[in-house]
Amino acid sequence: MNKRTFRARLMRTAMAAAVGGSGFALSSCDPAVRTTLLSGLEGTTQGLSSALISAFFLSMDDDSSSSGLTTTSP
């Protein structure tokens, strides 16, 4: 159990260093490269967010045929 918590702490520290270090790396980067990288990350993040939100609402969609209820119009 102690080994697992050490590994989790190590992973959290490594992720924090990677995320924090990327900010320092981008600050000294060529502006054209930085713009290209950030616009690519923005597009990827927007696409992933859109896909996850769509998947969430599709999973929430209740198919009326599976519930046994049918609607009829008078």
Image (cartoon, helix red, strand yellow):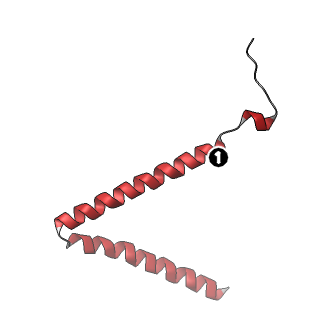
- Going by the image, does 39 lie left or right of 4? left
- Going by the image, does 48 lie left or right of 56? left
Q: Secondary structure at mark 1?
A: helix
Q: Which residue is mark 1?
A: 59
The residue at 57%/49% (across/down) is: 55
| Position of 49 relative to 17 (above/below) | above
Q: Quadrant of the N terminus?
A: bottom right
Q: Nearer the viewer, residue 55 or 5?
A: 55
| Position of 7 relative to 44 (above/below) | below
- Going by the image, does 63 lie left or right of 16? right
Query: Residue 7 is drawn in which quadrant?
Result: bottom right
Expressed as whole percent of the image width and height from the top left, the position of residue 51 reads 50, 51
Expressed as whole percent of the image width and height from the top left, the position of residue 54 reads 54, 46
The residue at 78%/26% (across/down) is: 70
Q: Nearer the viewer, residue 50 or 65?
A: 65
Query: Residue 44 is drawn in which quadrant?
Result: bottom left
Q: Nearer the viewer, residue 67 or 25?
A: 67
Please, what is the three-letter code of the amino acid marked with disc 1?
Answer: Ser
Expressed as whole percent of the image width and height from the top left, the position of residue 60 reads 65, 43
The residue at 25%/62% (across/down) is: 36
- Going by the image, does 12 lie left or right of 55? left
